[in-house]
Amino acid sequence: MSEPRMPIPAPEDTYKGWLFKWTNYIKGYQRRWFVLSNGLLSYYRTQAEMRHTCRGTINLATANIAVEDSCNFVISNGGTQTYHLKASSEVERQRWITALELAKAKASRMQLESDDSGDDSTPNAAGQSTGSRNSEVQSTLRTLGSKVEDLSTCNDLIAKHGSALQRSLSELEGVQLGGETSEKIRQVTERATLFRITSNAMINACRDFMTLAQTHSKRWQKALQSEREQRVRLEETLEQLAKQHNHLERAFRGATVLPSSQSNPAIDSKGPVPRKGDASDEDEENEFFDACEDVQEFITVPADPKYHRSGSNVSGISNELGMDDGTTSLDEQSLASNPESPQSQELVPVRKRRTRIPDKPNYSLNLWSIMKNCIGKELSKIPMPVNFNEPLSMLQRLSEDLEYYELLDRAAKCQSSLEQMCYVAAFTVSSYSTTVHRTGKPFNPLLGETFELDRVQESGYRSLCEQVSHHPPAAAHHAISERGWTLRQEIALASKFRGKYLSIMPLGSIHCIFEKSTHHYTWKKVTTTVHNIIVGKLWIDQSGEIDVVNHKTGDRCHLKFAPYSYFSRDVARKVTGVVTDKDGKAHYVLSGTWDEKMEYSRVMQSSRGGENGADGRQKTVYQTLKAKELWKKTPLPEGAENMYYFSTLALTLNELEEGVAPTDSRKRPDQRLMEQGRWEEANTEKQRLEEKQRTVRREREREANRAASPSEEGKESADGALIEDSISDSPLKTEEVEIASEPSETTYKTDTDETSSDLSLSSGHQDNYTPMWFERLVDPMTGEPTHIYKGGYWEAKEQGNWDSCPDIF
């Protein structure tokens, strides 16, 4: 008795079928079920997935349809979604193209009509538009909800009456013809009528629901697309805010100033705080500040007012202390904060230096193909192409330590050794400021290579560097200034490649001597780490501790370079330090970052009682005055990102100059070719120079072996024993460091069992080489063997006589 079910007609723009969709290079094309409906193309893995899971949908209203060949075509909506599809035949592809084009045209018309209807109701203000849209959506949802409830009610009624009708019909079949027949038929008729009424109500409710859904579906699609675009914009904004968060936090922590009304309750109890600008000295002295925050080894708090009013507590300080209007005390005048002050600009350059170099070429290179076989080896044993270099040598990088020579100029004028220590410590930190973006490796200098930096007329100093040893690679540096200071150092680099990062450990001490006060300072460099060697963007970190020691007075500055930690709340690249006298009493607290600036604060009182540190000991609490700027980094020149992130000084280091020695780094051909962007030629020239250096060294060793005699060998053994005794207390003896510079050479280690043989190597006597301008002596201050400038270079330059210089290029 049941009637056949009528088929449901499909919409005109509905099209379904199997297509092959490109997934990736591993799986290639995969068979997917595609459904085109209402201007949307969706796909599923199987037809059964249509009930619950849609793998992807693209809106054809803004899509571009392109045919590639007889079976392939591409659908893209502007970059965010792109489908590479393939039909089973050319006829099938044409059917899909026709259906897609018709659906796209219809979808475009529907979107245009929706835009027109939406524009009519667009409010004037953006806020009103958002509010009206939200209220409209809520109202529509409520209406749809009521219609759904009506459908549910009608469905229940249909089910109930349908069951009753079925029972009546069943009873009718079993009734004998008689008087009851008319009654049963009447009941069936009534129930059929009731069922028809209910069905009509359901049909009307369904019609209303569909009409309402079709009316608002276009607007919902538009609103959804708008929300998606807004979400993308919000994600981009959040990403930018995340990048700026760390910088803002650093700026906030570094510049936090605690007003007197908040930093010292005792002052509030005595009376109101005077306004800024009052003439009273006591009013100006009632303002206190934190020297730094979140220092791990110590805690700083504002100093008590009594230290401001007593001139006897601070030597050389007048009654006036630092104020917001810029006035400073006598010792703070000597600790001038800005390296760009007029004092540093007394000398006017007589020569215009270059301000640009050729931009760095964009050459691609597979780093892993070179580094995968180098894990665990010393860096100087790896043959590196110039692609990893920057067009400067290690000697020129050493000369960059003088970037902020003004700090030493001011230190030479200080009357107090403690104030002088602050400047020397700031100079120590400033030498790392040029490395924050410098991920390129400098050229390894050839044995006998030199570099001069003559800035007497411009800045009052000149310096000379020479590569004095090849095994291990070591360079000596000597700088002297007309302002009364001398800087010398011998640096040997030990480097280790660990796969994910590269560690560079400088070995050797740096000496700074002031002529007027005869103060002699020494310190060592911290470890430099280059992260993300294989994957990711390269970045550099400095970590470790430095002890700057004044050997004449016993003053000491302990600096700590905090390693970067993702989970740390401290400022990135943070540096903290305390200046103490020979008795261990703290006088200054230093804080800042090695890539931006350093500040100092005078310590008025110190005590134990802070929270416990990592080792369980209580932190020292320092009461300090207002922090003053000691050093600030000079901004990089414009376009530095295209010039290897060179500073203003670094851009001039490889500039050609007349009168320099023939061994000067400026005349190195492979380095010059790289600076000019001719990297292929630079690689060829680099290999030629390295092979030439090996040939010269082998010849020098053969001559030394021919000239050797048993008596001389015994003398050499005795000399080796003397040298061993002289450095038995040196840190170099106890450290195990791999040192080599060529791929074919053996790795040497300075351990306790091979001291004498390794010392002969490290001193350069193995190949009988003697440096031109430096001689190896035992430093009287530290007891370490080091190369010290013996003179003669600048005299040879004045005479233009370079006959004694070797031909290394």
Image (cartoon, grey):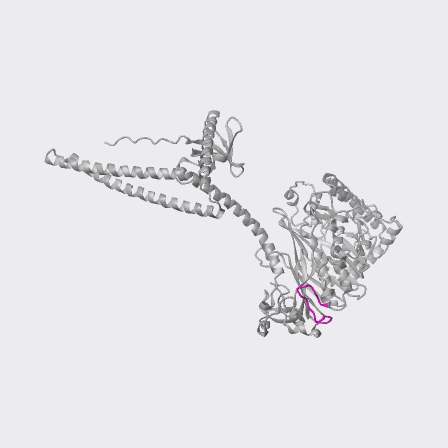
Q: Position of residue 398 (x, y in %)?
A: 75, 53
Q: Front-most of 93 and 766?
A: 93
Which residue is situated farthest in the top direction here?
Answer: 91
Quadrant for the C terminus in the image: top right
Residue 307 falls in image quadrant: bottom right
Q: Front-most of 474 and 77?
A: 77
Q: Position of residue 738 (x, y in %)?
A: 70, 53
Judged left or right of residue 389, residue 50 is: left
Which residue is situated farthest in the left direction here?
Answer: 179
Q: Position of residue 538 (x, y in %)?
A: 64, 48
Visible in this render: residue 218?
A: yes
Picture layout, residue 2 above or below residue 432: above
Q: Front-most of 386 and 264?
A: 264
Residue 725 falls in image quadrant: bottom right
Quadrant for the N terminus in the image: top left
What segment is highlighted magenta in the picture?
Answer: 314-329
